[in-house]
Image (cartoon, helix red, strand yellow):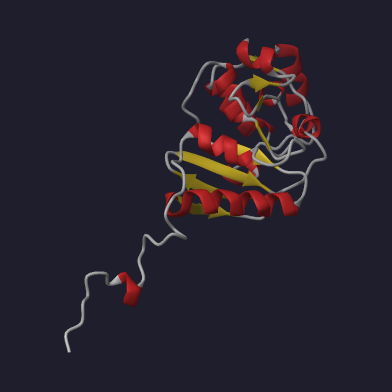
């Protein structure tokens, strides 16, 4: 008896099944839309991505996403995976964050801490120039916009473990700290002079 094998997926399935096939293209607009899809009380995109948009840059190192609780974290992860399928894959995971490559973008879902609102997220950042969010319309906002655009490096939360590494990173971006504030920090006894990539927390 002859068997018609025109569609072998009936027997063996397919790598491009409906479950894995992207439902939308992994553009920046679609990624942001899905992150903000259901809840105005989080999650929030904030940090380096917002700072770069405030500077008129449209190529980002990563998109950092912050949450109000673990349920929202898991809900967002599932929503992104459902939409992007095999265009989204995990590249790194730690207790602090799970990082995905989504098309051309690196999306970091932060879980090292959860926050009641975006102001609490901003207040957790070490430098004021990082206190910039990216809203649903891809517009920057937050208390750090002016410092981000004027290349001012101002301490918000001092972290002795990470300060020198973070300072070097932002000086490399062209930011300048007030000399008196810098000397004051250098004189602190708890300042860590030995650091590696682990101090960045992700």
- The x, y position of residue 54, in whole percent, is 59, 18
For the view shown, which residue lies furthest in the left direction? Answer: 2
**Closest to the observer, 178 or 92:** 92
Vertical placement of 152 versus 118: above or below?
above
Residue drawn at point x = 74 percent, y = 34 percent: 191
Work out whether residue 202 can be spotted. no
Q: In which quarter of the image is the N terminus?
A: bottom left
Residue drawn at point x = 48 percent, y = 23 percent: 58
- The x, y position of residue 133, in whole percent, is 67, 27
Residue drawn at point x = 52 percent, y = 37 percent: 30
Residue drawn at point x = 47 percent, y = 44 percent: 102
Work out whether residue 32 can be spotted. yes
In terms of image quadrants, where is residue 162?
top right
Vertical placement of 191 versus 145: above or below?
below
Vertical placement of 80 versus 139: above or below?
below
Indicate left or right for 71 with 5 as reference.
right
**Closest to the observer, 103 or 20:** 20
Disc tally is 0
For the view shown, which residue lies furthest in the bottom direction? Answer: 1
In terms of image quadrants, where is residue 10?
bottom left
- The x, y position of residue 8, in whole percent, is 27, 72
For the view shown, which residue lies furthest in the top direction? Answer: 150
**Closest to the observer, 98 or 29:** 29
Indicate left or right for 8 with 182 as reference.
left
- The x, y position of residue 53, in whole percent, is 56, 21
**Closest to the observer, 146 or 189:** 146
């Amino acid at each position: 008896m002859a068997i018609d094998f025109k569609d072998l997926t009936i027997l063996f399935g397919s790598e491009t099944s409906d479950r894995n096939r992207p439902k939308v293209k992994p553009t920046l607009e679609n990624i942001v839309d899905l992150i903000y899809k259901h809840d105005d009380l989080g999650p929030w995109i904030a940090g380096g991505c917002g700072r770069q948009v405030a500077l008129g840059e449209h190529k980002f190192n990563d998109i950092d996403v912050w949450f109000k609780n673990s349920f929202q974290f898991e809900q967002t992860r599932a929503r992104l995976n459902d939409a992007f399928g095999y265009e989204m894959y995990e590249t790194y995971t730690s207790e602090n964050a799970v990082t995905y490559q989504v098309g051309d973008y690196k999306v970091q879902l932060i879980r090292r801490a959860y926050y009641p609102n975006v102001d609490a997220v901003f207040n957790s950042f070490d430098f004021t120039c990082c206190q910039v969010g990216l809203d649903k319309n891809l517009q920057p906002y937050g208390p750090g916009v002016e410092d981000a655009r004027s290349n001012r490096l101002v301490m918000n939360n001092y972290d002795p473990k990470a300060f020198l590494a973070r300072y070097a990173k932002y000086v490399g971006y062209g930011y300048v700290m007030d000399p008196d504030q810098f000397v004051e920090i250098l004189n602190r006894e708890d300042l860590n002079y030995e650091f590696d990539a682990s101090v960045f927390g992700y």
